[in-house]
Image (spheres, grey):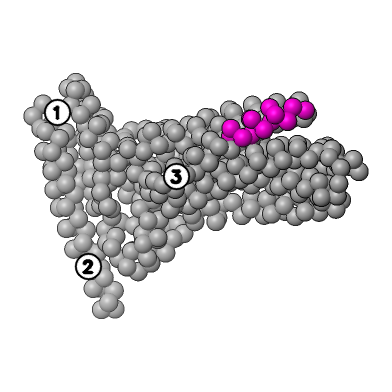
Amino acid sequence: MNIQAIAVSNGFGSVLLTILLISRYSTRRHRRLEDHLFSTMIVLAILGGIVETMSFAVDGQPGRLNHLWNVLENTYLYAATLGISTLWILYVDVRLYRSRERLRMKFKPLIFTSLLMILLLIANIFLGFFFTVDAGNYYHRMPVSYVFYVYLFAAMCISVFILYRYRVEYGYVQFFPIWMFLIPVITCCILQVVFYGIALIWGGIALGLTAIYINIQSQQAFVDPLTGLYNRQFIEHTMLVMKTDQRSTYYGIMLDIDYFKEINDNFGHSVGDEALCQAANIFRRAAMLDAQVFRFAGDEFILIMKTDDASSASHMIDRVRGEMNRFNEAGEYPYQLSFSMGLAKFDLSSETIDDFMHKIDMSMYEDKKRNHERIDRERRKEFMQ
């Protein structure tokens, strides 16, 4: 055992993650649930690197206090591995789907399993079925301990499955390469399992978390942080590219959430944020691979699609309404969603980007006027009854 090599490896990972954590807080990247989950993984990994180095330092050292530290430190390392595995699954899901409610509905068994394993770890302090520390204060990994490595690998596989399902539902995911986390973590984990006594996993986790953070930060200018859709700046970039493609035909749809202010007023702004994320999911499902979806401003969104067929563009509106109806009929949320939509063709040869944006904006407001008149009539009718 080379304690100096372990200290350097884990120390480098802990310092790297500490800098990353400071950077996140200095830029106020800690407000949303996904930010809290990511920051918690960072903290667990920082402590993991420090604690693992300390556990190697006291391993084999005589004394009751060293024995107690050895037991508690290794208990933390197992718990932290379990915690990061669970948090990674939750982080991937909320990063893609942007829904707290989905976490509550889908991952109760995962949380229960994690809590059960924590209780077993506490029991292990007295019974020694995961690991033991002998009279000479030497740590011994028991065969049952491999369940934590299995859990870690299972978490990685589940995250891949979540990403795959999301791609099936909404199309290709930009700016979230989870393999940049998976490869170093899995590689280091395999090496640590095969070569007993080396310490690589916390360095692998540090490398994976840093790689994910750098990639997301590098693309942050183009993605709306709440919905995960492309933002207004990326619309302008996309349309400049479209202007150079004179041989193709593009259509745009502007979408606005009807009576969105009432959702905020009646249920609060956190529910309003949830509604924006659910609207974004509706647009993703409707668009699939046929179009790009952008959050334009506030509760306004834009769909851009490349097609020579005007009926395909109109069909996109029908698909949005179909997904909207399925969402409302499911009744899983305390609000209903309705959209006003305006459709227009982008005349690349004669229109500027501003001309096109104004055209779909005016088309949307005409639809919005009709929708509000209809909804107001229905409300007056219900009131009279």
Q: Name the residue under label 3.
A: 24
Label ID, residue 348: 1
Query: Secondary structure under badge 2?
Result: helix
Q: Which residue is drawn at 57% across and 46% down?
A: 43
- x, y percentage for residue 236? 22, 35
Residue 192 covered by magenta stretch = no
Highlighted magenta segment, given as a residue range: 1-13
Q: Mark 2 points at which residue?
A: 376
Amino acid type, residue under disc 2 in the picture: Asp
Q: Looking at this view, name the residue that lies furthest to the left.
A: 350
Q: Residue 204, located in which quarter of the rendered image?
A: top right
Residue pictured at 14% horizontal, 28% vertical: 348
The structure residue drawn at horizontal position 71% and vertical position 47%, both measured from the top left corner, is: 76
**Image mark for residue 164:** none
Whole-percent x, y for residue 115 in the image: 69, 54
Residue 351 vertical position relative to residue 22 in the rendered view, above or below: above
| Whole-number angstrom distance, CA of label 1 to CA of label 2 | 38 Å
- How packed mark 1 is, by other alpha carbons closer than 10 Å (few <14, some 14-19, many 20 or more), is some
Q: Where, quadrant-wise, is the C terminus in this rendering?
A: bottom left
* Amino acid type for the residue under numbered disc 1: Leu
- C-alpha gap between disc 2 and disc 3: 46 Å
Whether the magenta-drawn stretch holds residue 4 is answered as: yes
Q: Position of residue 246 (x, y in %)?
A: 17, 22
Which residue in the rendered view is the most extreme toward the bottom? 384
Question: Can the viewer see residue 116?
Answer: yes
Residue furthest toward the top? Answer: 247
Does label 1 or label 2 sit earlier along the sequence? Answer: 1
Q: How crowded is mark 3: few (under 14 residues within 10 Å), some or many (20 or more)?
A: some
Label tally: 3
